[in-house]
Image (cartoon, rainbow, N blue to C red):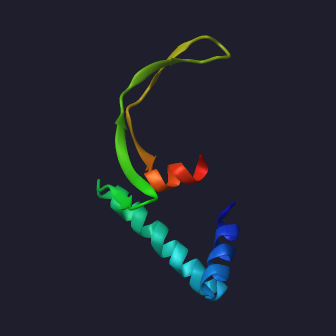
């Protein structure tokens, strides 16, 4: 399922117009992004938790040349599924 499919699903499930469903999805995604940008965890009970973690700098190897390269430290988004979501997919 991609973004347009999700918008179509919201439209059918709620009876909203496609424009309203798009606004609702965009607002939700914007809120999640804003929370992560402010180093906050975003918890949706029954769905999961979005958070930001630190990835340490490390050495990696270029598979083509075998040369070692240094990969810089980075902050990366992380998602931990909730128990309801885990039970649904299992």
Residue at image coords 40%, 68% = 31
- Residue 32 is at least partly visible in this image: yes
Residue at image coords 38%, 26% = 57
Q: Nearer the viewer, residue 83 or 71?
A: 83
**As displayed, is residue 80 above or below residue 42?**
above
Can you give x and y, in whole percent of width and height, for residue 74 in the image?
Answer: 39, 37
Can you give x and y, in whole percent of width and height, for residue 17 in the image?
Answer: 64, 88
Asked whether, in this view, residue 17 is left or right of residue 34, the answer is: right
Residue at image coords 70%, 68% = 5
**As displayed, is residue 76 above or below residue 22?**
above
Residue at the left extreme, as displayed: 39
Count the labels in the image. 0
Can you give x and y, in whole percent of width and height, for residue 23 in the image?
Answer: 54, 80
Asked whether, in this view, residue 63 is left or right of residue 27, the answer is: right
- Residue 82 is at least partly visible in this image: no
Can you give x and y, in whole percent of width and height, for residue 79 in the image?
Answer: 45, 48
Tell me where residue 58 sits by quadrant. top left
Tell me where residue 40 sits by quadrant. bottom left
- The quadrant the N terminus occupies is bottom right
Q: Nearer the viewer, residue 83 or 8?
A: 83
**As displayed, is residue 78 above or below residue 23?**
above
Residue at image coords 62%, 85% = 19
């Amino acid at each position: 399922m991609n973004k347009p499919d999700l918008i179509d699903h919201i439209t059918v499930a709620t009876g909203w117009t496609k424009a309203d469903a798009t606004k609702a999805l965009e607002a939700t995604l914007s809120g999640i992004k804003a929370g992560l940008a402010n180093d906050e965890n975003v918890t949706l009970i029954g769905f999961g938790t979005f958070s930001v973690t630190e990835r340490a700098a490390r050495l990696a190897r270029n598979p083509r040349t075998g040369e070692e390269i240094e990969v810089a430290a980075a902050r990366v988004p992380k998602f931990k599924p909730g128990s309801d979501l885990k039970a649904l997919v299992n």
